[in-house]
Every structure is written in C-alpha cells, then in structure tokens.
Image: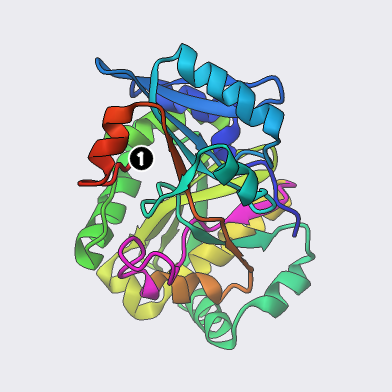
Amino acid sequence: MNQLTDLRQSPLWGDYLAHFGWKMLRTKSGVALSVRPTFMGSLIKIQRPHALSKDDLDEIDLMAKAEKALVVKMEPSPGQDLDLLTKDGYIYSRFPQCPPSSVYINLTLSQDELWSKVSHSAKYSINRSLREGTTFEVYQKPDEATIKKFYYIAKDTALLKKFYIVPFNDYVARVDAFKDKSYATFVRDSAGKLCGTKFYLEDAGQVLYVSGGTTREARKHKSGYLLMWESILHFKKLGFSTLDLEGVDDPRFPFYTKGWGGFTHFKEKFGGEVIRFPVPTIKYFSPLMKKLSGFAPFSL
C-alpha cells in the first residue's frame, strides 16, 4: 500500500491543535509545522510529512529560527532519507509522540477480499455477535451528548486496561475542527444497551482510528469484532481509501508500547498491512535545551 499524506499534516489537524495554543505553519512544499510558543521560545513538531529534501530542511531551519525555536521534533514517514536528516543535525529520539507502528486497512479492496483477510477467530466472533442480535450504528459529527456516551465507555476501558485517555474536551475539540469528518460508532446488544464504541477522524480519504472501548459485558460476547468490521464496511461504502488503526506493539520502543499486546492482537486479526515508521528525530536550536537533554531527554 502506498504511503498516504498523514492526517496530522492536514489543515483540519491544525484547527484541532489551535484549541490548545498551537499554530500551524507550512513550507513552500506544503510541510506542516505545528508551533507552540512558550515564554522561553517555541516548540515545533513535524509529524509524518512527505519525504523531505535538503531544500525542505533548509526552509524548516529558517522558519524555526524565525519562531525562536528551542527544538524541532521530527517524526518521519516511510521513504524518508534518514541520512539527510542526520547530516542536517537531527539526532534519534527515544520518545515518539505518534505511535511508531500501525496497521493500515486497504478500503479499496472488495468486501469479499477484506473478509478473506479477517482471521478465523475474528470471523467467528463477528458471526456470533450477529446471531446474538448485536446492532451497529454510526454518528457523523457527533454532538456533545453522543461524545459523552463514547467517552464513558472509552474511559472505563482505559482504566481497566491501564491506558491513558485524553480528557473529554479533547474529543469535543476534534469534532469542532473536523466537523462532518468526525465519526463515533457504537454497537448495542439485543436489549438495546450500548456495549462498544470507536471514534474516528477522516481527511483526504484516510480514516484515523483515535480510540474506543467495550463494556465488561461486551468483552464476553466479542461484539468489539463486529464493531470494527462494520466500521470498515461503513468507511468503504463512503469511498475512503485507507483506515489507519493507529498503534500496535513495537519492540523498538518497549517503554512506549508496553501493554499494547492485547489490542495489537485484536487489530492484526483484520488482516491489514503493518507499517513501521522511521525512528523519530530531534534537532536542538537552543544550546541550553541540548545540554539539559543529557540529563532528562526532551520529549516534545
């Protein structure tokens, strides 16, 4: 599957970050720099840009200096010439901000082709959920009441599995920025009780899975598998090209992906392509920040 322009490079992502004090600048070739001013200087992050050239890096340096940048944190896309980054002063970072690996589902495949890639156990769980009367529903540009329903289940799952979940207002900000390109999906049991949910964003045909969860009861009858399968079919019907399942276990970063084994196993059952992103890099523009990084490596 060809690497697509990441959603974090989109103007809509800039609108989302603006809720939290960031601004988005662009190079002549369209590379998005997310800039957060502080009293000491600016923090800049560049996430999943297209493969950068020397001209791109020179322009980024000029923009960073104009913004009085302390550091620039770069998370490259596949295809990036990493030697070019190191020659320009970027060093490898042990602290990714984006998940360093993911699973991409190719939505341009036929439904039969997609089904053929689903594991035997996942197919069994999907069919079992259908037999038990589980139903699927989707909300485009969910209102605050719908986001609250999503968040209640997602937060409960995060607490149970000991994962971090961003605050409720973060999801409100995402919907405010992405509007009709934001989606909340749910499954209900035969009695009509909500038992699972997922939240997605979309831009330029690429769907990003943000987070989700299932109730304790739902985990017993595996309705989360039906929730994922029906989400795949829904986004395929809308004509989107790729579903990024956003994050799987990566042995290069055991501290970052610790505890991801369970949902990694779940995501891999849908037969997508595992994508390993290049190791993140960082460039210090502040001598003080560079010196301090030797004691407490900076994680932007």
Where's the C terminus, which quadrant? Answer: top left
Q: Callout 1: helix, strand or loop?
A: helix
Q: Which residues are magenta?
A: 239-262
In the displayed structure, 11 sits above or below 3; it is above
- Residue density around tag 1, few if under 14, some if 14–19, many if 20 or more, within 10 Å: many
Q: Considering depth in this image, is 55 or 139 the residue closer to the camera?
A: 55
Residue sitting at x 57%, y 28%: 32
Quadrant in which residue 166 is drawn: top left
Task: Name the residue beneath numbered marker 1.
Answer: 147
| Image location of residue 27, percent across then percent down | 64, 21
Task: Let me know if residue 87 appears in the view.
Answer: yes
Q: Amino acid at mark 1?
A: Ile
* Observer-nearest of 164 and 92: 92
Place of residue 90 in the rendered image (x, y in percent of width and height, measured from the top left): 50, 41
Q: Is residue 159 left or right of residue 175?
A: left
Q: Quadrant of residue 252?
A: bottom left
Q: Name above or below for residue 116 compared with residue 135.
A: below
